[in-house]
């Protein structure tokens, strides 16, 4: 009987030695994943503000910019992509498409002096510029928490637990292709 107690105690000790770090690692991964999700929600709220402002700006300038159908088409396409995006990767791509369209709209509006003198357009442009800055800040914060999370998921020994429990790396928010170039506005 004494041997059976020793075996039971030995098994319990081994389970504790393995179980405690396993649970601690799981909790740590879960905390990091929650940080990523919370920061993504912050990005989404700023993106939503942008999506809400754009129709107001477009409506304010549309009558004076009838020849700029290409810009308005790009905005409509981007809004459609945003509404259809279901995964986080699709949302990131759609946000990049919207960012590109907004940049073109801003560049176009700046080339119409009569629009820039409108108080409504000026206010909307200021709001949009402020929103773009907030989006940029939230994107940077998101990428920082993703970096921390992805490093944890890919680092040993955490990577073994992450793999067993289905924790996967998260996508970074990257600039849309061509974002390093100023948008071209053609008035021909």
Image (tube, grey):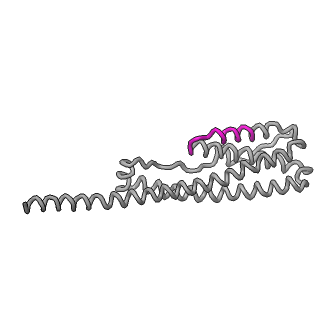
Q: Could you say where residue 112 lies in the image, as x and y percent from the top left?
A: 88, 48
Q: Could you say where residue 25 lies in the image, as x and y percent from the top left?
A: 37, 58
Q: Is residue 67 magenta?
A: no
Q: In which quarter of the image is residue 142?
A: bottom right
Farthest residue, direction front: 1
Near-viewer residue (123 or 9): 9
The residue that appears at 62% across and 54% down in the rendered structure is 43
The residue that appears at 27% across and 58% down in the rendered structure is 18
What secondary structure is the magenta-colored segment mainly? helix
Q: State whether residue 173 appears in this view.
A: yes
The residue that appears at 21% across and 60% down in the rendered structure is 12
Q: State whether residue 188 appears in this view.
A: no
Q: In which quarter of the image is residue 75?
A: top right
Q: Does the magenta stretch include residue 80?
A: yes
Q: Could you say where residue 24 lies in the image, as x and y percent from the top left?
A: 37, 61
Q: In this view, does 123 lie to the left or right of 7?
A: right
The residue that appears at 12% across and 62% down in the rendered structure is 6
Near-viewer residue (112 or 188): 112
Magenta-tinted stretch: 75-88
Quadrant in which the C terminus is drawn: top right
């Amino acid at each position: 009987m004494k041997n059976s107690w020793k075996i039971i105690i030995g098994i319990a000790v081994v389970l504790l030695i393995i179980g405690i770090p396993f649970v601690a690692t799981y909790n740590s991964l879960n905390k990091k994943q929650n940080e990523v999700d919370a920061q993504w929600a912050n990005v989404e709220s700023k993106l939503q503000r942008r999506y809400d402002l754009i129709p107001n700006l477009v409506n304010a300038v549309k009558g004076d910019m009838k020849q700029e159908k290409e810009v308005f088409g790009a905005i409509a396409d981007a809004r459609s992509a945003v509404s259809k995006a279901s995964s986080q990767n699709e949302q990131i791509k759609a946000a990049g498409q919207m960012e590109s369209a907004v940049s073109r709209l801003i560049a176009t509006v700046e080339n119409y002096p009569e629009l820039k003198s409108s108080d409504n357009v000026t206010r909307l442009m200021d709001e949009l510029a402020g929103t773009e800055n907030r989006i940029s800040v939230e994107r940077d914060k998101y990428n920082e928490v993703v970096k921390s999370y992805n490093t944890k998921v890919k680092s040993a020994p955490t990577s073994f637990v992450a793999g067993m429990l289905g924790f996967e790396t998260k996508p970074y928010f990257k600039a849309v292709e061509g974002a390093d170039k100023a948008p071209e506005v053609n008035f021909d």
